Amino acid sequence: MTAEKIFKNPKNLKRRKFINSLMILLCFIAAVLTILPLLYIFIYTTQSGITALNIDFFTQLPKPVGEEGGGMANAIVGSGILICLGGLIGIPIGIMSGIYIAEYSKSFLAGAIKFTTDVLSGVPSIVVGIFAYGVVVLSMQSFSAIAGGFALGILMIPTVTKITEEMLRLVPHSLREASLALGVSRWKTTVKVVLKTASSGIITGILLAIARAAGETAPLLFTAFGNSFWQTSIDQPIAALPLQIFVYAISPYEDWHRQAWAGAFVLIFMVFIVNFLVRYVTRNKFG
Amino acid sequence: MTADNFNKNDEVNSSESEIFIESEDSADDQAKQKNAVVTNNLTVYFNKRSAIEDVNVKIKKNSVTAVIGPSGCGKSTFLRSLNMMHEMTPSAKVFGEIYINGESIMNFNMVDLRKKVGMVFQKPNPFPTMSIFDNVAAGFKLNGSAGKNDLNEIVEKNLINAGLWDEVKDRLKSPAVSLSGGQQQRLCIARTIAVNPEIVLLDEPTSALDPVSSSKIEELLYNLKSEYTIIIVTHNMQQAARVSDQTAFFYLGKLIEISRTRKMFTNPKEKLTEEYITGKFG
């Protein structure tokens, strides 16, 4: 049907306009449905968590059952240590494999790496935990922060690789040529021009990977294991925020439930901060 | 000779070609010395299809050579083979000989060659993460040789040479992408000549620019001629006629004619050239 006919046929036009508005409405509802759960989680955790939140929560160790007060200081520090260890493993490997795929690949190997990364990002985190248990815990004969960091690192690799690759591909070919034409070697071009141009996007990816790793519980269950005392040496079992929340939430004690909510609130808040940081970093460059 | 063993055989080639040059007759040798660029049977393949075939040119030092021809005729391929830019394309294979100031490019590694043979591209491509100052100094900064040179002096001199100094001297620290397209292209020229090449290749440098910016760049080329050998690919016949000393006409991957520009545009040797110049095809 030609455009002329559509305009000459008001009935048809009406029907089309109706379908158009209906579809827009459906999209709008879908968009609201995306926001609602997040909003609900945030409000509910804030309501339940903020009452148990005080200075003690950030400075005290967990108290035994029955005693009032106590905090999750060891778990917060433990999470920090685990994320640092995970980052030390995941970020360099992720960035470098991303560079390889985007810049130096024309081979079968690059395709294989890409496929593997995609599969790895879909592997359930508990499976990664079992793997870390088999590789690190069994060989060290002990649960440890190293094992937990190893598991988190493996979980971070696919995210960082993917983002690095995508960001490097966004860098215009002409910039590489400009640098090469100045007599700059390929490697220096990659690091000082391509990587630098893509840096804000890559930082985004790293922060998102960190935010994801911060909330992981399953892979820590039998690697970092958890700990109710101060522990900062990395070859010993260590506490982590999500683990502590898990343990407290399934306990039968009312007091511990409130602490678990507070922990959840802190965790969500941290992820929020990271997300805002991401927005800030990216806006700064491309805005 | 394939693209791949340009590098690997560096040492072997240098010793071989020394013997090779000595054994040649002196007239040919002299020709190579006098000319900035000489190619012998230069042929470039992409995926077994030839982009240019058997190109023989001699380009004098401190001259401007225009390369014209319809799209896809191999102009850019020819230009890019002179500083091994085709290395970026894995499927490219190069045969034949290229001499830069009498020396076979097989004797250079890519990095050294590109320092001697600079290139300006069709679309202005300043580094977006760098300031105007840093862009001009990029050749030194990226190579890590910034400390040995007085960058302030280099940047000022080359911006003056590129005719951009007066427009940007008060905002050297602002991002390069804040400049207009024409200014960006002159910045790219400043960046290229800052590393002091002997030959400057320009691949349609004005095709993305307005007429005023274009004429500024043409003027600039005229001034740069005294210091550099310039090879410019252009789609604009008037531009070729205005700026160049000699013109090369490519068609379907073959060099049809290369002669002095005035002769080319008034009395071309080949019928094909005449038809192209007068707009009968292309």
Image: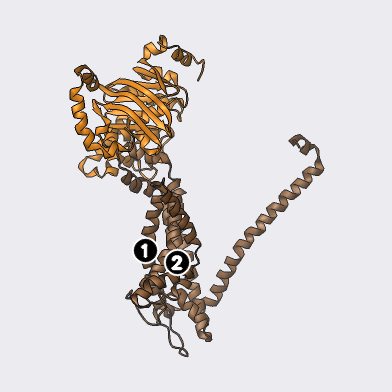
> Percent from the top left, x then y, of residue A178?
36, 38
Q: Nearer the viewer, residue A163 or B237?
A: A163
Quarter of the picture holding the N terminus of chain B: top left
Residue type pointed to by label 1:
Ile
Asked whether residue A159 appears in the rendered view, the answer is: yes
Q: For mark 1, name the chain.
A: A
Confirm or deny contact between disc 2 and disc 1 (CB under 8 A): no
Q: Colour of chain B?
A: orange
Residue A25 position (above or below residue B86): below
Packing grade of label 1 (10 A; few <14, some 14-19, many >=20) is: some
Residue pointed to by mark 1: A89
Left or right: B58 in relation to B215 = left
Q: Give me the chain that's brown.
A: A
Q: Nearer the viewer, residue A63 or B15?
A: B15
Image point (39%, 18%), residue name: B242
Instruction: Answer with mark 2 or mark 1, whichever residue precedes in sequence.
Output: 1
State the residue lying farthest toward the top.
B267
Name the element at disc 1. helix
Q: Nearer the viewer, residue B29 or B130?
A: B29
Q: For mark 2, name the chain.
A: A
> Percent from the top left, x then y, of residue B42?
34, 26
> Percent from the top left, x then y, of residue B266?
41, 10
Residue pointed to by mark 2: A213
Image point (38%, 38%), residue name: B88
To the question of a shared chain for discs 2 and 1, the answer is yes
Residue B72 position (above or below residue A268): above
